[in-house]
Image (cartoon, rainbow, N blue to C red):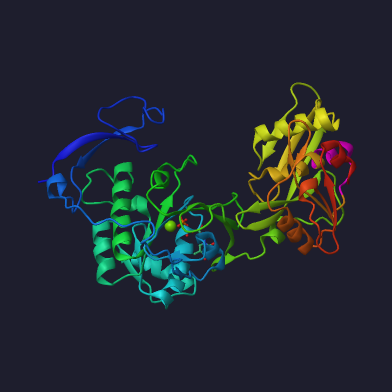
Amino acid sequence: MAKSKEIFICQNCGAASPKWQGQCPACAEWNTLAAEAQRSGRPGDKGVRGARSRPTSSLAAESIDAPARIGTGFVELDRVLGGGLVAGSVTLLGGDPGIGKSTLMLQAAAALTAAGTVLYATGEESLQQVALRGRRLGIGDAAARLIAETCVEEIVAAASTVCARILIVDSIQTMYSERVESAPGAVAQLRECAAVLVRHAKTSGTAVLLVGHVTKDGQIAGPRVLEHMVDTVLYFESDTGSRFRVLRSVKNRFGAANEIGVFAMAEIGLREVTNPSAIFLSRHAQAVSGSVITVLREGTRSLLIEVQVLADHNAGGNPRRVAVGIDGNRLTMLLAVAHRHGGLELGGQDVFANVVGGVRIADTAADLAFVLAARSSLRDAPVPASLIAFGELGLAGEIRPVPFGEERLREAAKHGFTTAVVPQANVPKRPPEGMLVRGVTRLDQALDAP
Ligand code: TYD
Ligand code: MG
């Protein structure tokens, strides 16, 4: 007989503790420990006595054929997955409520039926609601099987009955396992449900997709505790009010992490955006001051992005530094380097930096563009609209090379840019046709360039 035992689980990080404490010893959050009864023993657990020694394998003996990929009907989703779904893999799709996770899964489900039986388990909507949405999306006649169920054991049984090759669970927060007594959504439930589904994926070869909601405060407490259990973690992100959605892989055992796919939410579901540079680039009829185009690298893809800086005279008090889309500390650092090594007098100025299109920049290659934009705004001198700039800025005012210089230049040339200011080491032997590439090693040189 399984025995009930009370343990305390942190609802933020998932750490377990034998007694209640006000502060989680693992993540130091306050008041996050909740009592959860957990029965000991796992299904199929034989205990030490019952365990049999299993034959072992070796690195050389295992077959290492590339896993077969199952197309999802979306080139963008396939790319983020590393070429398509892998049989027996578990993928977690996280994102804010209402961002379009169910829509993406339903549209993918329709396409995936070409590869085998798809079971879509919904714990949030009724079968009618899902069917209605399917009809609206124009995939009402797809052969995907539906089940409205919140018990994972039932879902696994149903998946086995219909021999599902692909199982979609929407969402993991609504699921419960019979073996855990806490409420759905609690960390112990999340982990147990995920564990049951992971076991099913690994033993049956079913590709499992889990949908997970991000919690209100933007912390991904729920899905985050599952990240280590699954093979692939994708997050669906968007700027508030924007119809564009960016799907990003933050972990992928079968492909590159940090790959992105871009979608647009339309009247009839999600559409792929195959040329994202075009949407993030707002072309001005004339060059405007404070705006510079740079080239980001996201996974295997180069993306043209416009960065803007507004420097405005500060009437009194501390000058303000406002950063949208770039880390505030990085902006402050760039402005300090621009002052010290580029002679930009930004001390008495309020500085506002923005990345167009709601994109968040983590790539240091955008450094140079921010400084050029700051100078352009300060001097009210527009940078030519045909110019792009990228390069990392060091504290000594040096411009450091960035990876994938040639690919970035090619993307810019493809979109009609004719001048590039880049780190000297990124200047290719043969620049793209029709493009003048200027290599710079120091900030003062770069500021002379445009
Ligand atoms: P949904 O997939 O239900 O989000 P999630 O599962 O991530 O919570 O998406 C719901 C939103 O998408 C809703 O606000 C309406 C919008 N939407 C469209 O604009 N067009 C469509 O065709 C569909 C199905 C949804
Ligand atoms: Mg949903």
78 is higher (above) or lower (below) than 214? below
Q: Position of residue 212 (x, y in %)?
A: 41, 52
Residue 139 is left or right of residue 322, and the answer is: left
The image quarter in which residue 17 lies = top left
Judge from the rendering whether residue 29 lies leftward or rightward of residue 259; answer left or right.
Answer: left
Q: Is residue 376 magenta?
A: yes
Residue 294, position as x, y percentages in the image: 75, 50
Residue extending furthest top? Answer: 317
Q: Which residues lie in the magenta part?
A: 373-383
Towards the viewer: 129 or 368: 368
Does 114 sit above or below residue 78?
A: below
Is most of the magenta stretch helix, strand or loop? helix
- Residue at 21% x, 41% y is 38
262 with respect to 115 (left or right): right
- The residue lying at 39 percent from left, 37 percent from top is 13
Q: Give above or below for 441 relative to 120.
A: above
The picture quadrant where one finds residue 401 is: top right
Can residue 184 be seen by looking at this rendering?
Answer: no
